Image (cartoon, helix red, strand yellow):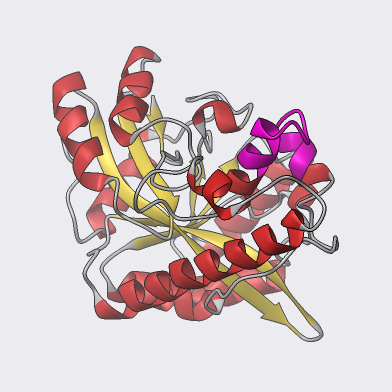
Amino acid sequence: MIDLHTHSTASDGTDSPARLVEVAARAGIGTLAITDHDTTSGWAEAAEAAGRFQVSLVRGAEISAIARTPGWGTGVHLLAYLHDPTHPDLLGETERTRADRESRARRMVDLLAEDFPITWDDLLAQTKPGTTLGRPHLADALVVAGVVRDRDEAFATILRPGTRYYVGHYAPDAVAAVRAVRAAGGVPVLAHPGADARGRIVPDSTIEELAAAGLAGLEVDHRDHTPDTRRRLRDLAESLGLLVTGSSDFHGAGKQNRIGENTTAPAVLEAIADQGALEVLG
């Protein structure tokens, strides 16, 4: 089985990179991608574990971006596979995003602290050194404080966009992000593009624009996509000559997603490997 979208404690997963690889191995995953938000800090630990557990490893990241159309924009996530982590264009964007994520988290903690027993130290207690900070860590702090039952409740109520506690963060333009991933030798795949429960979905016209900029594929098989959405996206990918992937978006205990619940075909992995600047390990 090939699972190309998972998260560790380097961002908002609950398993360390090594534990993530172990979980994958025990679930029968033969090839795993580690794709933490805007960081590659988990790569080395995951690579060491992949050798021990005999799991092939695709090194990647999930890049935050904004797709802009007249009158509005929507957040999108690009799965970047097998890119050079030191390339200045992409590294500059991810470092700027990570810095603004931290500033945003501080602002949100200040707002939450006006009504709930939450401090900055409470947030940090839910992270590891170097973690890419995000709303899931705020959610975890709220759970520990007894304000909500779990992450899902926090996201559905206190932390959802539109509340007085929500603050946005910087992210690059999606077209520029696709080009930056390609410049770094990476293979960009649009993550869960039809997940309407997350907010506005990316319109087909924007996906066409991203394809023209170098987008390699669409993550079609994902738990947040209905059967009708999967059919629509599969047809769109075929019409644009894009690869079709399937992934779990596993976060450990942070989400209900099960590792390997959606997978990618071997031929698609081979095509990704052929395009990437780095090799698949193992």
How far across and how far down the image is residue 276, in percent?
25, 58
Identity of the residue drawn at 24% across and 54% down: 274
The relative height of residue 211 versus residue 10 in the rendered view (above or below) is: below
How far across and how far down the image is residue 49, in percent?
20, 29
**Res. 202 image quadrant:** bottom right
Image: magenta residue range: 139-154
From this viewpoint, which residue is outermost toward the bottom? 70
Identity of the residue drawn at 42% across and 49% down: 36
Q: Is residue 112 left or right of residue 96?
A: right
Q: Is residue 118 left or right of residue 92?
A: right
Secondary structure mainly formed by the magenta segment: helix
Q: Is residue 99 visible?
A: yes
**Res. 83 image quadrant:** bottom left
How far across and how far down the image is residue 170, in percent?
57, 75
How far across and how far down the image is residue 282, in percent?
15, 33
Q: Nearer the viewer, residue 191 or 23?
A: 23
Tell how many labels: 0
The relative height of residue 119 versus residue 240 in the rendered view (above or below) is: above
Q: Is residue 214 visible?
A: no
Q: Quadrant of the N terminus?
A: top left
Residue 153 lies in the magenta stretch: yes
Identity of the residue drawn at 35% across and 40% down: 33
Q: Nearer the viewer, residue 103 or 240?
A: 103
Q: Is residue 128 left or right of residue 97?
A: left
Residue 160 lies in the magenta stretch: no
The relative height of residue 275 versus residue 10 in the rendered view (above or below) is: below
